[in-house]
C-alpha cells in the first residue's frame, strides 16, 4: 500500500518548534507528548485524542488543522498528549485490562506535571475528545489534576449515552471479539493486510453490510464506533484523502475500554469500573461526587448529528447546571457528528473559532502576575 500522506508526519504544522517529551506512569507505562511552539505565549493548550486515534488527528496536513489554528490565533504553546489509548503506542494491541480509571489516575497527572515543569504556573487550557474527554473529565472531577484554566470536552463527558444498537454492541462485542473470534483487538486497516488473514476476512464480512462507500476502513470504523452509515462523521465533511486514510488515523483497539463504557451506560454516568480495586482507592466510585465544587469551566461540545454518543454532552451540561449553575457552557455544532469537528475540511471555519472564543472568555493570569497586580 502506497500512502498518500506519510504515517505520523509532522508536515501539517509549519514554522513551529516541535519538542517531544517522554515520561512514565505510576503503573509502569511510557507515554509521550509533542509540544508545538511559536513565539512566546502566556497561555498553554493541552490537546487529548480519543480511543484509537493520536496526535495525528490534530496536525493533519490536508486541512487547516487545530494545532496550526491555535498557533496562528494567539495560543503559541500547544501540547498534544499521546496517552495509553494512542495508536502511536502499542498498548491497544494486546488483550489488556486497562480502564478509564487507570487513565484518570495514572496518565494525566504526570502529563500535567511535565507541562508545569516547563511553563511554571501559566494557565493551561484543555481540549479533549471522545474517551479522552471521558477520562480527562474523570481525572478533573476526581481532583487528580488541578490548576486547569478551562476545558473543552467534545462528544462525551461524564454521562455517556449511545444509540440502541451501539448499546447492544457494547454489551456483546468485548467477549465475542476476545473469546469467540479470538482477536486481541479490532483493526480498521485489516483490509490492507498482506496475504490472506482472518482480519482481512472479517473486514470483508463487514463490507457486505456497508454500501455507503468503497473504503473498508470506514466500514470497520462504523462497526467499532456508533450506529450509522457512516457512524463517525458525515462523508461530505471530509476531504477525500482524509476518508481514504482512516485506517492510519484510527488505529487498532482492544476491548476492555468498551466494558467500562457499558458499565457507565448501566449506571447512567461515569463510575469506577471496579470499586474493590485498592490500586484505584484515590478515585471516587462516582465521578459526580465532587462536581459541585470544581471551579474549572467546561464547554460540553457535541456535533448535532452525533451517531456515536448522541446527546451525551447535552445531558452532562444539564446535570452540571443543577450542581454548579453558570459555571459551564454547551456548544452544539450544526452539521457535524462525532469525529468531524476536528477532521473536517472546514473545521477551521465552523468549529475552531468557537474554541478560541471560549478560551478568550476564560483567559487567566499566572499566580505571579496576580500577586504583582495586587502588590
Image (cartoon, rainbow, N blue to C red):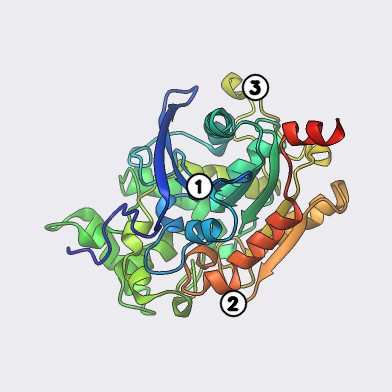
Separation of residues labelled 1 and 3 (CA atoms): 22 Å
Q: Position of residue 125 (x, y in %)?
A: 64, 46
If you read the primary sequence from the N terminus, does the residue marked by circle 1 or circle 3 appear first?
1
**Residue 178, image quadrant:** top left
Say if 234 sits above or below 373 in the image.
Answer: below
Q: Residues within 10 Å of mark 3 (few under 14, many from 20)?
A: few
Q: Say which mark, if any, is on residue 4.
A: none
Q: Position of residue 323 (x, y in %)?
A: 86, 46
Of the two numbered discs 3 and 2 in the rendering, the one whose residue sits closer to the viewer: 2
Say if 120 sits above or below 315 in the image.
Answer: above
Which residue is label 3 attached to?
A: 281
Q: Say which mark, if any, is on residue 335.
A: 2
Residue at 38% from the left image edge and 56% from the top image edge: 250
Q: Residues within 10 Å of mark 1 (few under 14, many from 20)?
A: many
Separation of residues labelled 3 and 2 (CA atoms): 42 Å
**Residue 238, image quadrant:** bottom left
Separation of residues labelled 2 and 1 (CA atoms): 27 Å
Residue at disc 3, secondary structure: loop
If you read the primary sequence from the N terminus, does the residue marked by circle 2 or circle 1 appear first?
1
Which residue is label 1 attached to?
A: 258
Judge from the rendering whether residue 165 lies leftward or rightward of residue 282; answer left or right. Answer: left
Q: Position of residue 45 (x, y in %)?
A: 58, 47
Residues under numbered marks 3 and 2 in contact, where contact means CB atoms less than 8 Å apart: no
Residue at disc 2, secondary structure: loop
Amino acid at each position: 500500500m502506497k500512502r498518500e500522506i506519510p504515517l505520523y508526519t509532522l508536515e501539517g504544522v509549519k514554522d513551529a518548534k516541535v519538542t517531544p517529551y517522554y515520561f512514565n506512569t505510576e503503573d509502569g507505562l511510557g507515554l509521550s507528548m509533542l509540544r508545538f511552539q511559536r513565539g512566546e505565549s502566556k497561555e498553554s493548550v493541552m490537546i487529548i485524542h480519543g480511543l484509537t486515534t493520536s496526535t495525528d488527528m490534530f496536525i493533519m496536513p490536508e486541512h487547516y488543522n487545530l494545532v496550526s489554528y491555535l498557533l496562528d490565533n494567539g495560543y503559541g504553546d500547544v501540547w498534544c498528549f499521546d496517552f495509553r489509548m494512542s495508536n502511536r503506542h502499542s498498548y491497544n494491541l494486546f488483550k489488556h485490562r486497562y480502564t478509564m480509571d487507570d487513565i484518570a489516575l495514572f496518565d494525566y497527572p504526570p502529563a500535567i506535571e511535565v507541562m508545569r515543569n516547563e511553563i511554571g504556573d501559566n494557565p493551561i487550557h484543555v481540549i479533549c475528545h471522545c474517551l479522552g474527554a471521558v477520562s480527562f473529565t474523570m481525572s478533573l472531577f476526581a481532583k487528580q489534576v488541578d490548576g486547569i484554566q478551562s476545558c473543552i470536552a467534545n462528544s462525551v463527558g461524564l454521562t455517556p449515552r449511545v444509540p440502541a444498537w451501539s448499546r447492544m454492541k457494547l454489551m456483546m462485542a468485548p467477549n465475542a471479539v476476545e473469546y469467540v473470534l479470538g482477536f486481541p483487538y479490532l483493526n480498521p486497516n485489516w483490509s490492507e493486510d498482506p496475504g490472506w488473514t482472518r482480519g482481512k476476512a472479517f473486514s470483508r464480512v463487514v463490507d457486505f453490510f456497508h454500501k455507503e462507500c468503497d473504503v473498508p476502513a470506514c466500514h470497520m470504523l462504523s462497526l467499532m464506533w456508533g450506529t450509522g452509515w457512516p457512524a463517525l462523521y458525515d462523508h461530505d465533511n471530509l476531504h477525500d484523502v482524509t476518508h481514504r486514510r482512516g485506517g492510519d488515523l484510527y488505529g487498532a483497539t482492544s476491548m476492555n475500554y468498551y466494558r467500562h463504557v457499558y458499565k457507565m451506560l448501566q449506571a447512567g454516568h461515569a463510575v469506577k469500573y471496579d470499586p474493590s480495586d485498592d490500586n484505584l482507592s484515590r478515585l471516587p466510585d462516582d465521578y459526580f461526587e465532587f462536581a459541585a465544587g470544581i471551579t474549572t469551566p467546561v464547554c460540553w461540545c457535541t456535533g448535532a448529528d452525533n451517531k456515536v454518543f448522541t446527546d451525551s454532552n447535552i445531558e452532562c451540561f444539564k446535570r452540571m447546571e443543577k450542581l454548579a449553575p453558570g459555571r459551564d457552557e454547551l456548544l452544539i455544532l450544526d452539521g457535524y457528528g462525532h469525529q468531524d469537528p476536528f477532521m473536517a475540511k472546514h473545521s477551521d471555519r465552523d468549529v475552531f473559532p468557537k474554541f478560541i472564543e471560549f478560551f478568550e472568555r476564560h483567559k487567566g493570569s499566572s499566580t505571579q502576575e496576580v500577586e504583582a497586580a495586587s502588590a
